[in-house]
Image (cartoon, rainbow, N blue to C red):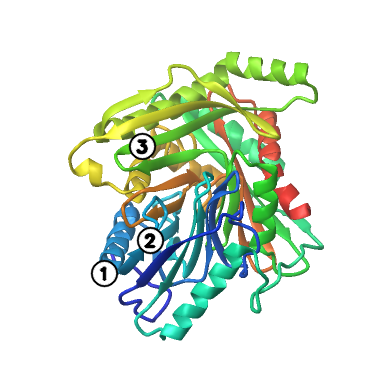
Amino acid sequence: MCCVVSDSRDPGRLTVRTIAVPDTGDVLAGLPDPDVVAWVRHGSGLAGWGEAARVTLPSGEDRFTAGEKWLRSLFDAADVDDQVRTRGTGPVAFGTFTFDPSSDGSVLVVPRVLRGRDGRGRAWLTTVGMPQDTAQAHGTAQAHGTAQAHGTPEAEGVPERALAGIRWHDGSLSAPHWELAVARAVTAIKANDPLRKVVLARDLYATAAGPIDARVLLGRLAARYPDCYSFACDGLVGATPELLIRRDGRKVSALVLAGTTPRGGSEPEDDALGAALLADAKNAEEHVYAVTSMRDALEPLCETLDIEAHPVLLKLPNLQHLGTQVHGTLRASREAGKSALALAGAVHPTAAVCGTPTGTAMELIRELEQMDRERYAGPVGWVDADGNGEFGIALRCAQLSGNTARLFAGCGIVAGSVPDAELAEAQVKFRPMRNALDG
């Protein structure tokens, strides 16, 4: 397998500098370029722009391994001056990976300028240059990022573009045809003994009057869904509630979500819907499969693994989910050296976004969805040179391309699923991105 680098220039040896800067309270404020990378929750996290290095990975089960090899070579050779030394400082790469190993388009990007804040009063700025850069050019990038960190006006930068004239179009399957796909999935589950669950997704297109600015969508999503992880990488923008994997030294954690119901219009209605979700056999079955797949993937890598015995409700502005927290300690062996990127590859795809058993579910998804999910439901997030990082599952998201946004939503299908109820759930899951585009 060979990696295809989109930039014909050899990035060579990166020169990286991280400095402490005043904490302005929001890493998304005043980003100067619409081609951003971001991973933000409650105003904390990372956000950057520009590309110091980039790789586009071809299809294959080993796309995570290939990406890790490329990144390790790049980071090991870098000349690093890190004056902060915490998670997310020094050289950092953002990644977005395809859901299906047979799909091309997984990407890793090292931004030229990156802001970070930890939500506890500490903030930093990282600039990345290359040997062929002049000292003046590298200094200009650093000055630009420092000014942004201080919230001062910029002489350069692209103003945010307002969204207007949004028109909506069906994706690969219309609503009635997608309901038929759900019905076929239920029939397949009942007829196929090993198959217990399959996750089916829909797509939907939005076309705007002008180019769609990722910064506008990020700002709206982060403000409306602060408990989610608002992300951007290579035009994929969204706010995911599901943390696929976090690595902090030998400590790993995840939040498994499966099982969904709407929020109520009043507190009593909301409580009743939540109680019904906790008691619902269909949603409980979905959730058990998702937790089991995470346990099966992490147990061989962990010295200890603590998984909550029962799910709890995760309440977001538009939905309630069944959620289970997972915490573990990597084995004191080669597993302890596995980066967040390698761990994301080890646990993807979970039953929460694919089904169980994985291979059978994947085959049925390819047959019934009649589309390429691309990077929807794949891992998205960041990893630093120490291997620490966070990857979520790319949900509640859209892929931007000029004036067009391609939205996705999916539902877990089991033997007890009802097609029109699954369609209604998918429509609700479209709302975060639809509302972000409609304003």
Q: Residue at x 34, y 79 (%)?
A: 10
**Residue at the disc numbered 1:** 77
Q: Up-down: is 432 above or below 402? A: above
From the top left corner, tell me how far across and down residue 181 is, in percent.
60, 38
Mark 2 lies on a secondary structure that is loop
- Between 399 and 39, the one nearer to me in the picture: 39
Q: Are marks 2 and 3 in contact (CB under 8 Å)?
A: no
- Between 307 and 414, the one nearer to me in the picture: 307
Looking at marks 2 and 3 on the same chain, the residue that comes earlier in the sequence is marked by 2
- Tag count: 3
From the top left corner, tell me how far across and down residue 349 is, in percent.
41, 41
| Amino acid type at mark 3 | Val
Mark 3 lies on a secondary structure that is strand
**Residue at the disc numbered 3:** 252
- Gap in angstroms between the C-alphas marked 2 and 3: 25 Å
**Residue at the disc numbered 2:** 83
